[in-house]
Structures are given as C-alpha cells and as structure tokens.
Amino acid sequence: MVEHTGGEFVREMMRWHFSPETGSPFWLERAERLDFDPLTDVRDFEDLSRFPNVVDELRDIGVRELIPRGYGEKHEASVYESGGTTGRPKAVPYSAEWHRRSVEWFSERLDSHGVPRNVDWLSAVPTGPHNVGAMAIDTAMLRGGLNFSIDLDPRWVKKLVSEGRADVADAYTDHLIEQVGHILVGQDVGVLFATPPLLERLAQHDDLVDLVNRKVRAIIWGGTHLDADTRDLLRDEVFPGVTMVGGYGGTMMLGTSVERPGLGDDEPCVFDSFAPYTTFRVIDPGSGKVVPYGERGQIVVHHMSRSALLVNNIERDHATRIAPVDGGFGDAVADVTPVASFGDTAVVEGVY
Amino acid sequence: MLSLDALGPGGPYRSRRQETIGDFAGNRVATLSLAPSLYVTRAMKALRRVPAPPFDARIEAFARAGRAFATETIAGLTPREYQHTVSTVTGIPITVVRKSTDEIAQAAERIHHSVENARPAGAVDSWRDPRARDGAAVWTRRGEVFAVHAAGNHPSVHQGWFDALALGYRVAVRPSRREPFTPHRLITALREAGFGDEGVVLLPTDHEVAGDLLRHADLGMVYGGADVVGKYAGDRRVLPQGPGRSKVLITAETDWEPVVDTIVESISSGGGVGCVNATGVLVEGDPSPVAAAIAERLAELPSLPATDERAVLPVQPTGLARRWDGYLRQRAAGSKAWLGGDGIVDDLGDGSAVLRPAVHQLDSPFAEQLGMELGFPCAWVAPWDREAGVRPLRDTLVLTAVTTDGNLVDELVAEPTIANVYIGDHPTPWMAHGLPHDGYLAEFLMRTKTIRR
C-alpha cells in the first residue's frame, strides 16, 4: 500500500472505494449524489476538496455500511466512536489491517524519539469506544512490553464539567490517579501513556512524580490538547529527564499524528500525520484557502486507506501550518489549540 | 513595550502565551504572561513550603515596600512612569492614580494599625506571651495560604489584601488582566523588601485557570459583581467583595444645601470608579431640589483625557463607553434624568471617550435602580420616609447619614448589611488607616484559641 506519488495513491484509493467490487455500501450509494466522478475527476490530493464533509452523516448509518466490500468477510474490523457527548456518536470501523499498520507506524515514531522497547507500559487513556486504548495495548505488545490499563471515560468527565459538577469530576480524577499510583508503586513501568489533564493532576502528587521520574523513561501524551507552556513545565520542571512524545489524533483520522522528533525546546510541538493515509491541511476558515506556512488556520483532515475514506473533515482545532518532512504529503501542524471565540464584552454591573 | 512576568515562588516566569495590553488608541503598552494551570498549582503548593517571616520583620518589610512603591524605580518603572501607564490603559484620571500611590504607600507603612486594631482586645498574639501561663486567648491564622482575585477598577483596591500578608499568610494575587501594573509593582516591592519570592506571588491567568488559585489556597477573596457574590455565597473559604452600593441619606430635619459638596464628592471623587462612591442618594421630603443641585455641580466637571492633570472623570474605549451608555439608558427607563439623559459619552476623538456623570431621580426608595453601581459618577436620587425605614438602605458598603435622629442611627448601625455608617457631613469615600473597610479582613483570616501553659 506504500505509494511513490501522491496522485497514484489517491487514484488507487478512489478505485478501491468507488468500484462496485471493493467500495463500501455507503460510498457506492453516496457517489450517486456527488456532482463529480471520483474515478475520473479525483486525480490528486488537491482534488479531495471536491468531496463533501460526510462525517455528520455517519451518525445516521449502520456501521457495516462503511466496511469496504473488497475485504469480503475478512475485514476483522473493530468499531470506534468519536468523542461524542451529545446525541448519537459517529462510529467508524477500523479494519484489522489498518489498525496493525497504524500501530506499526506509531511504534516507529516512538523509536525515532528513543522511546525504549521491551519495557512495560501504564496507559491511562480511554478504551471502550475510543481507539487510543487499543493503540496503547497493541503498541506496548508490539514493542515487547506488557500494558497496564486504567479505564477512563472522557464522556462522563465532559458531561460532569458541562453540568458544572466540578467536584464530582475532581473525585473521578482522584479515583484515576489512585489507580495510577497503585501501578506506579507496584510495577516496573517504563512508559506512561496518559492524557494531559491526568499528567497535570499527577504533577500535584510529589510521591507519584518521584516514582515517575525514577521509573518511567518516556511519557506519551494525547487525547486532549496540551498548551505549549504546560508542555514546557512538564518537560523541564516536573518530569526532567523523561522523554515526552505527543500525539494528536481522533476517530475520524483513524489514528494519530505524532510529534516530530529532534526539535529544540523552544520550537513548537509539530505533529506529522501518517501520510499519505492521513493528511492535514491548514485553511483560512473564512476563505477555505490553505494558509501560508507559519500562519494559523483551521485543520482539515483527509483519511484515505483501504479501511476508510473520510476526507475533507474540518476539525474544530486550529494550528500553525508547517511544511511536512521530506517533501511528504499535506501539512504538518503545530501548536494545536481548540477554537477560541471572542465575543463582545458584556456590561456587568458593579465596579469590579 | 513593557513585559510583565508572573512573579512566582521560583522568580519571574515568562509564558509563551502573552496577553497584550493596549491603550485606547490601540497602541501596545505591555504584554502580560498568563500562567497555565500547572504553573499555578505548583506555585500554590510552593507557598506552603516556607514559613512567613516573623511579625516585626513583616511590618518592617511593609514599610520599606510602601516607600519603594511610591518613590523608587521598580521593575524598571519610575513612579511617574507607572502612574502614567495605569492612567493610560485604565482611563482613571492621573491625579487619582497619583493619590492612590500615596494611599497605598501609607497603608503599607501603617499596616500594624490595621492588624493590631483588629485583634480582639483580650487576645495575645503568641503562645509565648507570659499571659498564656494562666490561660489566654491567642490570635491565630485560620490557614496558611491566601488567594485573591483582584479587581482593576482602582489601584487602591490592592490594599484589600495587605492584612493577610501582614498576618503571616502567604498570598497569591491574580491581577485584573486590564490593570496588572499596580499589583506587579506592589508585589515586586514587597518581595524585594523582605517577603521573598515565596511569600507573595503574582499569578496572572485566564478565566479558566483563575479558580485554581482559590482551589489550592486555604482562604480567598474574590472581587466581582453580584454574580460573583452569589457564586461564593455558600463557600466559607471565600470572601466575596461585591458591589459597594454606597449611599447618602438626608433626613428632613437637616438642611441639605450645606452638604451638596459632600454628596458630589461622594459620587464623583476618584473618578467615581470606586465601591465607596455613592450610587444612591435618599432624601426625606422632595428629592428634586437635591437632584437638581448635584446635577448642576456634576455637569461642570470637564471632559479631558485621563492623563490630563485636570482630568476628574474616567475614560474608556469609545465602543465600551457606548455600551455602558446603552445599558444605562435601558435601565434608567421610567426615571427622571437630571443629567446624562442625552447620553454620557463624550468622544475624545482618539478612540476613547469620557464617561460623564449621570443623575436620575426615582419615584420610590425601593426602585431597583438604587443599587445600580456603574464605573463612573452615576447617582440615583430617591425619596425616603420613615415608613420605608432601613429596608432600602440595606446592602450598603458606606452609608453617609446626614441626620440628627439618634434612634435612626441606632437602626442603621445595627443593620448587619450596612458595613460602615458616617453620620453627618462626611463623604462616603472617606477612609482612615486602621479602620475597617468592610469589617477587618482579619475577622475572616483569624480565630482565637485558648492556650495554657
């Protein structure tokens, strides 16, 4: 599946997803309502912008409709869902073939950061409907480690926070930290995989910070944003000497992008996607045009593999557009942040 | 351009995330580091590690810091440069900022008055005191770390947390993002004067991180509107500082004409931006002549840029000034406008506008507008009678009661929601060192315990 030119790869993917023998029921039906012919009109990455963003349609279809026929009965797919706190979540099948490939690539990226192999992992990342937990388990195994999992339900936390029940959310986080603590104390953990909020909470416990600094050689973070200042503090003050590797992923990109290795401490955290399968574009949300390198814009994700075709998906996140490595495909993204909104200042009574 | 760092327990901290503070013309004046949650959490923890200096050392450090604040170059700014900056970005008249500098310095130099006056007369301040041999009340802290969500309406608001630092709390201040200059200067001076980097910290944050200061403190104080007061009403650890809603009451047997100056001063001194500025004027009898007289006097105040030596009114960005104006008009519907009815915005033509005084007359002392406090001289004049009594005077920071009726004064002094009562011809913004502003802060910070040895 490794291609030499982007165009060749894109055309191969179009043939797979839009040929009656190999395409998914969803795309074969959906193609009839496109105002272009993917088989002839989509020749390269730039042509992907012709596709509509279909991710919202995923809420309303049976997930089996998304499995390409080309796999026959051998798809061995697992279903993962988007974060989803309101309404029905969006479900996507990941073929076993794709998941394996994604794990292998992730592992190679960890090698490039010098993350040790043959050590055990402690993964405090969501399992269940979320893909990242499976990535943790299988990546640890591929690299010769055991994985200790702590379960984490981000939908429950989001719900608590949105309902203003910060005390319950806090209690839940304490519950997670307590479990992390038991494993850190009792097991020889070499890699810690956790979300940034959990790392921040961990940082409040001096005893656990000591354990991490004594045992853990690499921390992988992902699942939520990590602002540059907090990243500096975690790396320089809380966990000095521990390699930190960030991931930026999501269900709709069928995996994750990984921090670029070898950058200086003052450089931003740059994420490279698993191209050509997953590629980023950074666009001006007003015009839809790609912004110049170094400028900020909104992230658009294309995913194209035999497993799925989810292109032109506009994420909520904003980032700085960075050139890809080695003339790769699409953009790299840096300083990813959630969309910030700036409203008018309301008049509040009182002098304060 | 100035760069204001967070002032943490490990020294100054410059974040990558920088907030730009501009003047009204849109020029960048300063950048402010905004500390992320992790920084705040670690800073708050660090404050617990080092005990406060002894009492006498704290008092001396306050005196030194106060003098430095008013007279020396601190963090690269002379007093004049500091004052000019504050006036430029906040629109507070320069003379008000200058006066406030002296007030802050004096408050620091006389801090022992405040904490000594607040101590219960029978309590000693150490278990080592010989009186504890037979058993004595010893005055002790209720915690170690105190957090403040400060306001930016007036530099003097920062005197509000002095008592906590003087009483041995380690103090963390989250400044207003609009006016961090005063607490930055003050805290730099206090650290240099002896409190050290781990005694008092400045933690500028965005709104989301602000709660972390309170979460990791033992006790805290939060300035804000009625919403903030409501939010923390049930939290014993937090002392909310809400609108002042200060008022003047004139009873029928007193002559109102000689106190017009005092009423005008109550409404407008310091630019009218303080919680001690009067918002309500209650008159037993016909309030119209009083309203007319104060409107006439307030109308004379000149519209000038805040940095002009003769400026007495606050300046705001024109857009914001217009929103205030719209809000005032909406809320003033149904009242009689004596001043400001045609608008309170006087455009200076440089992107900023003077907020001019407003005087409205209400039909009833129970009209809801009476407690409506805005950040410029804005007064609501209403009739009052004995039947209304103390009810419309509740929830008042400073009440000036121009009256000879001792029974009424008894009632006013007894009313728990009136914080201060000035009887006779005294302006509501009057304050003196060593006297409580809204009770002594020490009432919240300290407790007594019996010690016998």
Image: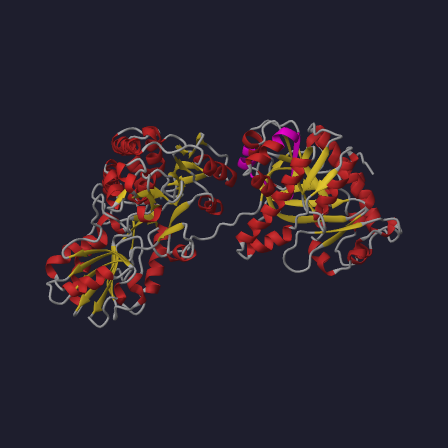
Q: Quadrant of residue B194?
A: top left
Closer-to-camera residue (A182/B42): A182
Q: Is residue A266 left or right of residue B189?
A: right
Confirm whether the magenta stretch covers residue A231. Answer: yes
Closer-to-camera residue (B210/B236): B236
Tell me, what colour scheme is on the image? secondary structure
Q: Is residue A292 left or right of residue B158?
A: right
Q: Position of residue A145 (x, y in %)?
A: 76, 34
Closer-to-camera residue (A201/A155): A201
Residue drawn at x 34%, y 54% is B242
Number of on-image labels: 0
Q: Quadrant of residue A10?
A: top right
Q: Is residue A31 left or right of residue A84?
A: right
> Residue lying furthest bottom in this view?
B387
Q: Is residue A325 left or right of residue A237?
A: right
Q: Quadrant where the N terminus of chain B lies?
A: top left
Q: Position of residue A8 (x, y in %)?
A: 81, 39
Residue A6, can we see it? no
Q: Quadrant of residue A205?
A: top right
Q: Give above or below for B206 relative to B109.
A: below
Confirm whether the magenta stretch covers residue A280. Answer: no
Residue B392, can we see it? yes
Q: Quadrant where the C terminus of chain B lies?
A: top left
| Residue segment shown in magenta | A212-233
Q: Position of residue A116 (x, y in %)?
A: 72, 29
Residue drawn at x 60%, y 52% is A157
Q: Give above or below for B207 relative to A3.
A: below
